[in-house]
Structure formats: C-alpha cells, structure tokens
Image (cartoon, rainbow, N blue to C red):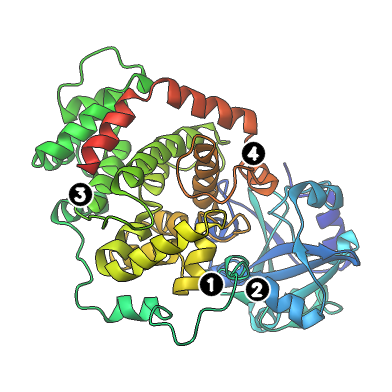
Amino acid sequence: MPVANTIIRHLDDQKVTYRVLEVEPFADAADAALRAGIPPEQLLQSCLIGDSSGQLMVVIPANRELNLRGVQQLLRRPFKHLDDKSISQLFADCVPRFLPPLGAAYGIRCVLETQFAILEQCYMLAGDRRHLIQIDKKSFRQLFRKYEFAKRLSAEPDVAPSIKERLLTPPDPNSPLLDLKAKIERTKKLPAMPAMAQKIFQLRAKTTPGIKELSDAVELDPSLAAQVMRYASSPFFGYRGKVDSVNTAITRVLGYDMVMSLALGIATARPFRLPKGGATTVDDFWRHAVYSAALCQSISNLLPEVIRPPSGLAYLSGLLHNFGHVLLGHLFKDEYLILGKMMAQNPDTPIQEIELSTLGAHHGDIGAWLMKTWRLPEEVIVAIEQHHNEDYQGPHSVFSGIVLLADRMLKRHGMGDADSTELPETVLSYLDITEYQLTSALQTLMDHDDGLRAMAYQLAV
C-alpha cells in the first residue's frame, strides 16, 4: 500500500516540506524506528481512543506507551481503546495501528506530547508498514500549529496502565508482600543464569555461530540433548527418518534458531523447582510451558510475512512466559504458598488480579525482572511481562499477542492460567489471523502430542 492520498493531500495543502522514506516492512512503531535507524523518541505514533462523545487521537513517542488513565483524568472522559474495525471505518486508506498523527486530515481531534515541539526533526507513520514521513522543526510548527499539546500522555513501556487498572483492591500498605520488586532487588540469593544456559546464550551472541558448536554444547548435557531429539522426533514435524543426534535435529528437522531457543529455554528454567501447595504444580507448569511453546511456534508461522517473527523466539517466549511463577516459588516460598491459598479461595478470580492485590505485582512482572537481569532477548521479556495484557501496543507486541492467543486457546483444554477463552478482536486483527486458523493449529498439535507429553513429563521429574 502506498502512502495514503489523504496524507499527501493534507501535507501539500499545509505547504510543508516533507520527505517520504521507504523502509523494510515493520511490525510496530518501535520496529519502524529500528529499521529506519532513527531515534524512537523522534517517531510520532498515534493511539486512537474514544467514548460516547467522540474519538481522540493521542500522539506519543514510539518508545513509550499510551497513559490511558492519565488522558482520562486530563480530559475527564471515560476513554477506551478503539478496536481495529472502528479505526478502519475512520481511516479507510490506512492500516490500523500504523496511523499518521494527522487527526485534522481525518476530522478527528488530536493531542500531542509536548516534547515533540522541541525536536529539530521528527518522523511519522504514514498509514502502512513500509513508509515514514520526515519533517523538520519549521514544518512541524506549521503542520501542528492548531493542534493541542499536553504532558504525561505516555508512560515508560515497563508501566502497563491497562493491567494496573484491573487491580481488584489496593494492596494492604501494611502487607510484607507489598514491595516484592524491592525484595527481589535486595535479595542476595538472586539466581545466576544456569551454566548451560550461559553457554548457549554466549553462542547466540556470536555473529557467525556454527551448527557444530551448538550441537557440541547441547550434547554436553545428555538430558538436554535427549529433550531436543525427542522434540524433533515428534510426529508434529513429519520427519520420517530417525533423529539420532542433535546435529540431525538441527540440520534436518528444527533448524539452528529453533534448537538454540529450545535449548536455551530448557536450560534456563529446568534447574528451578516449585514448592508443593503453591499457585501451580511443577507438572502443570511444564505441561503448559511445552504446549504453549509449540503452539506459539505454530502461530508465528501463520502470520503475514511483514510481521512474522522468528519461530525460535516465538517458541522461547511461550516456553518461558510463566517463569515468574518459578521465580516466586524459588525465592519466596511463603509468599508463593499464600498466593496458592488465595487462588484456592477465589477460583473464579483471574490469577493476575489476585497477584496484584496480594503481592503488588503479577507473575509477568516478576519473571521479566529476572530476565532483564539475565539480558534475555527483549522480545521474550515483553512476552513474559505483557502476555495477559490484550491492550498492550508497545514494542514487540507481536510476541505478547502470540502468547496471549496461545494461552487462551490452551485454556479451552484446561491448561494454563489465562483469564478467558475469548480471543480479543484487536489482537486477532493486529496479527492478521483468524480463530479458525488458531483452532486448526491447536487441533494439529493435539493430534500429535505424544512427544510433547513425554517432554513435559521428563522436564518435571
């Protein structure tokens, strides 16, 4: 899709100087900045919200998230995110989530973050996944001279207002569990990355790693090698030969990136144990992790090429997305057991709401804190942190969206802690995938799940 005529016509009518840049297809605003080689704080991304009184476009930097609660308080209106169907009706010549920050061109009120006014140059999305528009300070002032500006429209990506808003009740200020993050940061027993995971992670950082290096590293751990070969032998992949080595698994079935992610995920999580009587059992954790990883891999292969992530990273995201449960049980047994009791007493309440009201954080936050310390890929960290948040639209939202859909599909089979089996239309639309495709992918997985069940069992013992 070329740059929309509405945009070009509006820019020309305003008599501003601009330049259209064509870049590699990007998945979101942050990815666009990365591919164009520009600072993300100079790229304007548009968020469309609305209420019964009308719509509002909020323009924020590409490296930040919309502070929905802040906008609601600023304008004293009960705004909500618009779904992609509503956005498409308003912006017929644009792809939803890639909207230009030109509300006036479409007859929509628009407010911008004040920091844009001091930039020497800035960039904007142009309505599709391939183009950006560059303007200088003079053109910016001319183009947006009649627009509104305000502060605190956005928040750092680590802040997830839409999740925090779901808090049932404020945490008890006298609770010893309130500042869990501070406790984790202060503890002297924060676990180091397991040695095998470090070895594999070092290979991942190399610019030209070899198949033999990865194969040799994995085979140093016979149990890990067996898991890799078992997964490659699954009927799910349709390989008719015998997988008798890690090298065969890499070269003939799974591929280098997939084996790298599989080995890294198992080596990272396997050494940790869950206390009995907590929020989840070790058997349930690994069963859900293994099935989620495989389904995330399948979903990633169904996405359009322009947003399709590496299947290995999608797999790793699924395998580790609930790692916060493991870390909580490993470091804070008492808190973990209390959480388990709270869940037993409130079986109909979503787990993240119980976690937030009890601990002041949810397992996504907790897992992400450690993964950041270990410097795991940012895509995986986002999936861990945001996989319950259907409103997340920040960097690497493709990964959190994939995991969210996988979780909700598996919930239909009694697996995992998803708070619903409904598939959010916004996520389906953004990933350009249908419920039928997801149902077919899950059915294929369940039809060939002998290897997955065996793998989950071995990891749990």
Q: Is residue 164 visible?
A: yes
Question: Could you tell me how far apart the alpha carbons at marks 3 and 2 are, in whole angstroms?
Answer: 38 Å
Judging depth in this view, the residue of 96 and 401 nearest the camera is 401
Q: Is residue 37 visible?
A: no
Q: Amino acid at mark 4?
A: Asp
- Side of 44 relative to 370 (left or right): right
Q: Give whichever of 41, 356 is nearer the camera.
A: 356
Dots 2 and 1: beta carbons under 8 Å? yes
Q: Is residue 99 above or below residue 25?
A: below
Q: Name which of mark 4 and mark 1 comes first in the sequence.
A: 1
Of helix, strand and loop, which one carries label 3? helix
Q: Amino acid at mark 3?
A: Ile
Q: Which labelled disc corresponds to residue 200? A: 3
Which residue in the protein does label 2 denote?
Answer: 67
Task: Give the percent coordinates (x, y) of residue 197.
Answer: 20, 52
Cα distance in 3D space between marks 3 and 4: 33 Å
Number of numbered tags placed on the structure image: 4
